[in-house]
Amino acid sequence: MMFLIRAALWLAVVSVFVPRDFAGEAFDLPENVTEARIDAGQPVSDWCLENAAVCDAGREAARLGGFLTDMAATRIEAALDEREARQAS
């Protein structure tokens, strides 16, 4: 927690000294989400037809990543519950 407070403090300090035009010219963001949408579905589908093995490996990696994320979240939640129970005792 202390790390986050220190990081926020130093970010605020640095942001005070950064010049206004540091990031370049300002640009307008689209007001409508459909204006900003990039249609990548068809090119990806076409690429996957040509490279089926790579796409299958990517799907499998995404499933494994989801499984590992769920497992990690479950373990973290259990550890937090256990810590909370110990502190309550």
Image (cartoon, rainbow, N blue to C red):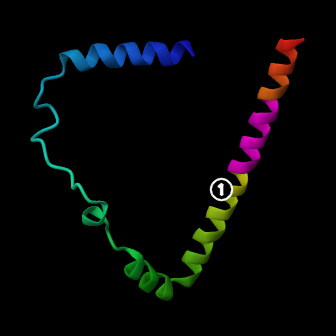
Residue located at (22% from left, 16% from top): 16
Q: Which is the main secondary structure of the residues drawn in magenta?
A: helix
Q: Which residue is mark 1?
A: 65
Residue located at (29% from left, 13% from top): 13
Above or below for 1 versus 80 = above
Q: Quadrant of the N terminus?
A: top right
* Amino acid at dot 1: Gly
Residue 67, position as x, y percentages in the image: 72, 56
Residue 9, position as x, y percentages in the image: 38, 13
Residue, far right: 89
User: Which picture quadrant has residue 23?
Assistant: top left
Circle 1: element type: helix
Residue, far front: 32
Indicate yes or no whether the magenta region holds residue 72. Answer: yes
Residue 5, position as x, y percentages in the image: 47, 14
Q: Quadrant of the C terminus?
A: top right
- Residues packed near mark 1 inside 10 Å, few (<14), some (14 to 19) or many (20 plus): few
Residue located at (41% from left, 77% from top): 41
Residue 29, position as x, y percentages in the image: 20, 51
Residue stretch rendered in magenta on the structure: 69-79
User: Which picture quadrant has residue 11?
Assistant: top left
| 51 sits left or right of 9 in the view | right
